[in-house]
Every structure is written in C-alpha cells, then in structure tokens.
Amino acid sequence: MKYNPSVIEKKWQRKWSKLNSFRAKINYTKPKYYVLEMFPYPSGAIHMGHVRNYTLGDLVARYKKAQGFNVLHPMGWDSFGLPAENAAIENNTHPAKWTYSNIENMKIQLKQMGLSYDWERELSTCDPEYYKFEQKMFLDFYKAGIAYNKETLVNWDPVENTVLANEQVVDGRGWRSGAEIEKKKMKGWFLKISDFADDLLNEIENLNEWPEKVKTMQRNWIGKSYGALINFSLEKSSEKLPVFTTRPDTIFGATFIAISPQHPLAKQISNTDFKAAEFIKFCEKNSTKEADIEKAEKHGYETNLTVSHPFKKNTKLKIFIANFILMDYGTGAIFGCPAHDQRDYDFAVKYSLDIIPVIETKENLPFLGDGIHMNSEFLNGLNTYDAIKLCIEKLNVLEIGEEKTTYRIRDWGVSRQRYWGCPIPIIFCNNCGEVPVPEKDLPIILPEDINFNIKGNPLDNHPEWKQIQCPICNEKATRETDTFDTFFESSWYFARFTELNPSSAFTEEAIKYWMPVDQYIGGVEHAVMHLLYSRFFMRALKHVNSIDIKEPFASLQTQGMVCHQTFKTKTDKWVFPSDIIKKNHKYFHLKTNEPVTIGRIEKMSKSKKNVVDPQQIIDNFGADTARFFMLSDSPPDRDMEWSDSGVEGSWRFLNKLWKFVQNLPNKNTKNKLPKRITKQNKELLTFLNTIIKDVTKAIDEFHFNIAVAQIRSLFNFVSSYKIENDNDKQVVLFVTSKLLILINPMVPHLAEELWYSLGNKNSISNECWPKVDLSYIKKDNIKMPIQVNGKVRAVIEVPIDLDKNKIEQIALKEKNILKFLNKAPKKVIIIPNRVVNFVI
RNA sequence: GCGAGCGUGGCGGAAUGGUAGACGCACUGGACUUAAAAUCCAGAGUCCGAUAAGGACGUGGGGGUUCAAGUCCCCCCGCUCGUACCA
C-alpha cells in the first residue's frame, strides 16, 4: 500500500474528533500544561506564518500530553479590526459576514493541519458573548480610576473625514485619498498603564523562561530614567517652565531651551506670534509615527521668550519651538547642552548657538561620556555621579527643582474611531458629563444596519444607535461612538480559554488551575505591545478584584519569519512562485514563457508575491509533510526559508518511513524486548536510548530541528539494521515503535497509521513518552583530539576517565604528533575526556 | 533616528570555550530500467597533493583575551523586527 496522506489524514482527524482526544480534562488534581499559540486574525486563509506557529505549538501540546500532563490547547479568533472594515468598503460586504466566513474557512484549514486543539473552547472576539465581558471590565477600570478620557493627537484625513491608523499614512498622505494628513487633537479613552510601570518593570526579572531579547525590549520600552525636574523662570513673567533632564550635571553647558510644538507655552506664544503659529502648523504636517518624527530634519523656531539660567546670574536662555521634542516624554521641554548631546549639538550648529563644554575631554564634541566637570562653578572637579547628586541638592535648597523619575511608556490609548470593535460603555450628557452605562443595560451590542458609504465612523453616523436618554437625568444624551483597540481583546483571551461558563468571564478555580499559560508561542513582532498590554491587563484586573494572577505567560517562545525566494520579470514585476516553471536550471513564466530573474530571499508577503499557499502544500503532500518541513529546517526562533526542494525532502523521508514500517515482518508481536540481547542488538538499543535522550532535550530546549535530525538518524540506523533472526525482529519492532512515539508530535497522522499497522489497538496519542534506559548509554571509551599548538593532529580512543599520564603516553605514540613535536613541549594541557594540547 | 536581534559550505542548519560543518537539500558517480521518473548505494567545505597519506585556508570584516574562539570583549558592515491607531 502506498503512503496516501489525503486518506489517512482525514481518517485520523475524524477519529480524534469523534473520541474528543484533545479535550482538556476538568480534573483539577492532575498536573496541567497550558500551551497557547497567538490566535490569528481571520484574514481569509491561513498563511505559512500560521502553519509554522501552530505546528510548533502542536508539537509541544502532543509532547506534553505524552508526558502525562492534562493539556489545555485552545484556539480562537482575534476577529475585530481594520481589515474587515476595509473589506466592507472595497467589496461592499458587512464586516460580520466577511469575518465569519473567513473564520469558517480558516477553521477547516486548521483542522486539515491535524492540530490538537480543544475546539470546545473556541472563541471569537467579535462575538458579543466574548466582548460583553470587556464592557464590564472597562467600567470596573473606570470606577477604579484606571480608565480616563483625555485629548490626544491623531492622523486626520481631511478628505475622508476620518482618523487614519499609522499604517494608513504613507509618506504623510492618506492611503486612499492621497490627501496630506494633519495632526488633529481629539478626545479618547486611556488606560493608566503608567501606574503599573514600576511593577511591570520589576517583575521582568522573574520571567525566567522568556527570551532575554524580549525582556530587554520591554525594559527599554518602559524606559525608567532618573534625573531632575528644573523649574526655569520665564523672563518678564511669574510663570515657570518645568524641564526634565537625566543630566542635571550639565546645566552649566545649557545654551538654549526647546519646547514641543504641542507644549501649552507654544500654543500661548502662537496666539500673539503669527510666525510661531505658522511653524507649529508646519510641524503638524507629519504623521504621528515616532520613526517619522525622529527621522525628519530638525527644525526650530526662535521665539522672543527667554528664561533665566537657574545658577548663572544674568544668563538668559532663548526658547525655541522644535519639531523633535515630544510632548509625551518628560515635560515636553528640554534644556539644550550642545557640548554633551548629539541632537543638541546638531541643533546648535544649525542655529549658530553657543557650545560650552563642561566635562573635561580630549575627544571631539559632543562628548557623551562621564568625566570631571569644568566651567560649572560649584560642580567643578566632580565626576558625573557626584555632580548630578550635588546639583539636585542645590535645586532643592533653592526650591527651583527636585529629583525626578520619569518613564518613557505612555498611557495606553484604547479609543478607535471605528465600527468593527467593542463599543465603549459610556454616555455623554450635557448635564451629567461622562456617564457609565448602568450594568443592567450591558452589553451594548454593535448595530447591524450600518452604512459604509458615508465618510467617517459608521457608529457616529447612526442616529438611532447614537442618540439615547441619559440614565441619570433622562435628558437627551449620546453614546460614546468609539470602540476599543483590538489589543484590548487580545489582552485577556488566554484567561477566557480556561472557562466554559457563558455567564462569567472567569472562575477562581479554573484560573487558579490553568493559569499562567505554560508555553506561549508567537511572532517576535509582538515582543512589546501585545505582551506588555497583556501583563498590564492582568494587573489591572487583579486591581479590580476580578482575577488573581499577575503574569499571564510563564514561558515564551518567539518564532522567526517564513521567507521565500522572490521572482521578477524583465519589467520588474513580481511573480508568484506558482507561476514559474524551471527548465535547464533557468526560470520562466508559466503563461508568458518570459524569462524570470531570481531576487532576494525575503519574508513572504502578498506585495512581493513570494507566497506559497499552505493549502497547495496540504493538497499535494499532506499536512504531515508541511508540518515536518516546518520543524526540520530551521530552529523556531530564526527566520526560515520555505523551499520546494526542502518540502520534497520531507515528503521523501515520510515515504521511506512508511515503506519501512509497512514492510516489517511479524508485526503482530508485542512491542517488547526479547529476553536475550545480542551485541548487535545492544548497539541498536544504545543508539535508541541516546536518541531518546537527545530528542527529549532538544524538544525541551525548543530546538525542534535538532529533534528532527536525531529522529532521522535513528531511522537511518534502524532501517539499515540487518534482521537475521527472531530476536533481531523483535528488537527492530521495539525500536520502531519508540521511533513512532518520538515522531508522533511532528507527524501525528502518519504516526497513528503506522502505529495501527504495527498491530496496536489504541491511539498513539495516548502513549507515554519513552524513558531513557541509562544502562545502555554508559560509554566505555571516548575519542580525544590531540592538538599541537591548538591544532588537531591526531585523534586517539581511550577508556573514559583514564588518568592524565596514561593519556599523554598514548598521545605521544601517535606518528603525526611526533612529526609536529620537533622540540620538547613548553606546556602540556590535558583535560580528561576532552582534549590534549601540546604547546611548543 | 532610537531600541532589539541575526550573520557558519552551493543552500537550510549542527557544535557545555576543546576534532567546525551533525541531519537534510541541491549536486556528482554507480545500480535498477528499452528509457525516464521514483528508489537504492557511494562521494563531497575550498585550495595544494595522486583520486592517497598529509598539509594550507576557512564561521560577515578588522582588532583583542586564551594553551585553545563560531562561541568571550571592542570597533565596523549588512539584513530583520519594533517604534505606541496593522495585527
């Protein structure tokens, strides 16, 4: 019988589903393991990134099940968001209809992959049964002071009359309208993540199973910095201008002040200074993206205001409005010390400002390091640390400043001016102000009859939905028409998976048992925002007493991207790999026969057309081949290249395995070892046990490609083993059965079918992970490299733990060693069981 | 701009500071076949050497620490991710 994945994969998928093989048990006494992959946005079809992510998670889930854990491995849909609205506008379909049909399709595809999900716990964030809980959470946050309303800057498209996402702003213009984007002030809801910044920062060090890089990124994102607040006195005014600095020690090098275009003082200046107003307007013609702002050319406008230097009498500092000062960081104002800061230096050179060095150095300015202070009156002679301390003391004494800690992290803006999101349960009343929707009126469900032909937010354009009576005074009032950022939904979905009860978001018992997620797996692009918001959200929920955990993810693994070769025609147009044919090592377009050139290997993206549809791979080779290739080539955290030849290699291997097991003789014997073990048998069993040990270690360390390589080696060994008698047969059957258990988490359909063909009645998914029999893997001899001056010149085999003198004696008998030892060695280094090095 | 990561044969990658290239892909030769595909067997980092023995070089580039560096330290180059309204 030939290996026919389309038949056996369907067969086992049906069995698993019928037997509920992967349903999490509600048995809170068994040790549990919660595996979770980042849930997908239902864009319409799965892509290779999903295949990779979910294959990794499935391997872990099946492996942990084999190790005896009660595994929770759920799946859901991150189904609110912009693409559904874009589809609604472009194809005139309702976002809900589009989304649900995408979910239906993708669910079929995930099932075809043979992923061991507990589908009973499936959730979709756009379902009122899910998002209803969020409205209660938000009101709890609101009452606890964690949620508040304030003004913020948004990208405004004056033609579309809409707020644009950063993604929708391309080179400062709206992606649909092409109109120049303006920054516009608008009110929105914020969550006080800054109140939790210290705890979020401090707890990072306890996330022992998180990648160091992710922890570093989160630390930097929170950006706690120590420094001073200095209140500069405005000339000819009693007002103060507070400025935050991490380097108060360089205050004597200050030669100017710069404030953000959004600073209240800038606004005040622009009331009387027409040119200042023009400059501020100019600064507003830029997107709100940090990268754009930072990369833009530095501009400043010199106002006619000055402040006095806090320590140098009769010294005035000019105030500039500058486009690179962010209102959201510190106080939105800085003092410029050009001698010791790169940006200040560039600015001073551009506007011909004084540059006063205050730290001794032989290097060119600006000098950014530490050193001894000069030109600094009472700070002269001090190092940076002492100077900062003394400066802050002086500020305190003079009552013009103080020690201050600031954070880079900003409060989380959760308002979106869009339809396809969870409605925010607030009512605006002219008499009563912001009024929370009474709990008895929850949930607020999105209206279905909406019109995308009118520009702007469909909820804002829906009078019956928007107009409402104030629950307090019964006067006319309006609903909040903003909806939540979709990060809101993804900040707690993992906790919801622990609960089946439709009437309450969580129960204490289930949370206590299942949380935290033991293994979370997803793209590194979520290293900061999604993961930090989730960590914050658990704290916020704890604060309002609805959940009792802090850290949602015990162990985190981030996966790399799936890349593929790109192809281009002579006219520089991208071509899909499926439209290409290879003839005599050259590539041609399938339809036009035009020659095609090979471009760089890049991340799979629709725009570059270097995508391979997982469906095609499943249809042509089966899910097991797709899964096996995903695991075999690259370590999970690195980018991988999808290659046709690699897939074919995996396909060939699975076929070889199939044929080998099918052709084994006497398959009905029990998978037990015979009583008598020959020397050859022992060799094979030694190999098996070494491989079990290595595969287990590789999986524990998330080096799945190594696990695959080890299993292949085991296969090569056992499949070339000469069977001469019944004993041999039994040993080979034994080893093969263990091999199948090892490979089951990778290619579960194939493993089930072969397991069955060995005469087993039970599903292989219920088998226990093999244990290492240490008695087989004790080594007697070891190979040791012999070096002369660090270069290997010979290899000797010696008994393990042989004493140093004897090793040296044996080494000195090697011809090639004697050849290089033309004089007596100066030093002989012998590391037992490792290496010998003669230094001459 | 800023923050973070990555860089090893023709290719994907392996390697507690201790024999660089496990395992695989592509390739080459052979077997089987009327032929091809599939399959099986063998070879292989590059260069010198005889196809041997053996040697030189070799982990993005440059420097350093060490008996010994892909691995640790410093500088540089290239690529990738994130940068707060894509998810």
Image (cartoon, coloured by chain):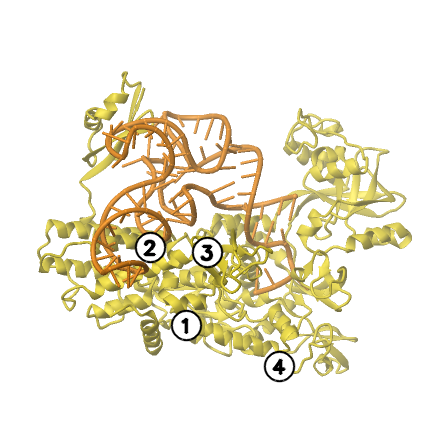
Question: Which residue sits at x=13%, y=60%?
Answer: A729
Chain letter, disc 3 residue: A
Q: Name the residue under label 4.
A: A440
**As rendered, which of A345 and A712 lies closer to the eye?**
A712
Chain letter, disc 2 residue: A
The answer to which of marks 1 and 4 sits earlier in the sequence is: 1
Hey, what amino acid is under mark 4? Lys
The answer to which of marks 4 and 2 sits earlier in the sequence is: 4
- Measured Cα–Cα span from mark 1 to mark 3: 25 Å
- Measured Cα–Cα span from mark 4 to mark 2: 56 Å
Task: Say few, some or many: other residues with alpha carbon within 10 Å of mark 4 (under 14 / 14 to 19 / 20 or more).
Answer: few
How far from the left and from the top, in percent, is residue A522? 48, 59
Q: Does residue A152 sit above or below A260 in this rendering?
A: below
How far from the left and from the top, in percent, is residue A421? 62, 72
Hey, what amino acid is under mark 1? Lys
The answer to which of marks 1 and 3 sits earlier in the sequence is: 1
Q: Mark 1 points at which residue?
A: A111
Q: Do labels 1 and 4 share a chain?
A: yes
Q: Is A678 displayed left or right of A347 in the figure? A: left
- Measured Cα–Cα span from mark 4 to mark 3: 39 Å
Q: Is mark 2 on a helix, strand or loop?
A: helix
Q: Is mark 1 on a helix, strand or loop?
A: helix
Q: Which of marks 2 and 3 is in front?
A: 2
Quarter of the image that includes the C terminus of chain A? top left
Chain letter, disc 4 residue: A
Q: Tell me if I can see residue A151 in this picture.
A: no
Q: Mark 3 points at which residue?
A: A556
Q: Does residue A579 sit above or below A207 in this rendering?
A: below
Q: Name the residue under label 2.
A: A708
> In the image, which lettered chain appears yellow?
A
